[in-house]
Amino acid sequence: MKEEKLLNMKTQDEQEHIEIYLKYSGFEEDLKGPVDQVLRGLFSSLNKIHPSLELLSKVQLTVDLQGLIEEMKDIVIIAPNGPLILCEKKLTVKELIGLNLIGAFVGHKLNLLDKISLTLDELAALTGKTKGSVSRRITSMVNDRWVEKPERGEYKISLVGIKHFKEKVFPNLKEEAG
């Protein structure tokens, strides 16, 4: 029994360790150990071989997918047929469009949806608004750089749009729901 417990503890300890071999332009390093320690070492090594990475991270616009999911969890969910808005507040057409496009973005990133974009017809159906109303608002959102057109007739949320919704729309929706 004791041997079995020791074996289980050893297996758990082994699972918490990671090994990374880093090789770049004459620089080589082999990092082994607990995941947190190795990741800190990896970032430190990357900063040594490419100091501009730290600067890049300060100016580059990226999406923290886990953070975005946490922000939207009570507002938008991903159903098999597409995003579903949970918010009971009366939303503007732009908010409905943006939330559905964010849902498509997250659904695609999580491999729950086949595509990252939605068509005008899909947006009209999902928002419950007319195609004309959706078309006018989405044109404005494209001009504001909140939405991109990856293909003709397709629309997807941009990183700028996600940033806008995370900073301006989600807090307002959560404030009113709470």
Image (cartoon, grey):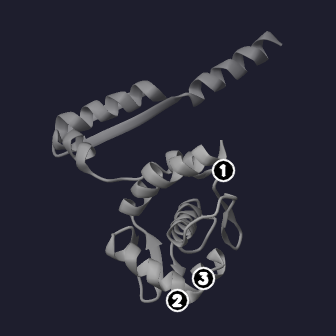
Mark 2–mark 1 distance (CA, rounded to whole Å): 29 Å
The answer to the question of whether label 2 and label 3 lie on touching residues, with beta carbons closer than 8 A, is no
Specify whether 43 is left or right of 85.
left
Point out which mark residue 124 bears.
3
Q: Earlier in the sequence, mark 3 or mark 1?
A: 1
Q: Is residue 118 visible?
A: yes
Image position of 42 with respect to 120: above or below: above
Q: Position of residue 25 (x, y in %)?
A: 16, 46
Which residue position holds label 2?
A: 132
Q: Nearer the viewer, residue 24 or 75?
A: 75
Mark 1, secondary structure of its residue: loop
In the image, what residue occupies the spot 22% across and 47% down?
56
In primary-sequence order, the first of circles 2 and 1 is 1
**Given this view, does label 2 or label 1 mark the residue nearer the observer?**
2
Secondary structure type for disc 3: helix
Image quarter of residue 92: bottom right
Nearest to the observer: residue 128 or residue 23: 128
Q: Is residue 129 left or right of residue 171?
A: right
Q: Which residue is mark 1?
A: 74
Q: Residues within 10 Å of mark 2 (few under 14, many from 20)?
A: few
Give me the C-alpha separation between circle 2 and circle 3. Answer: 9 Å
* Location of the C terminus (image quadrant): top right
Residue reaching furthest to the top: 2
Q: Quadrant of residue 26?
A: top left
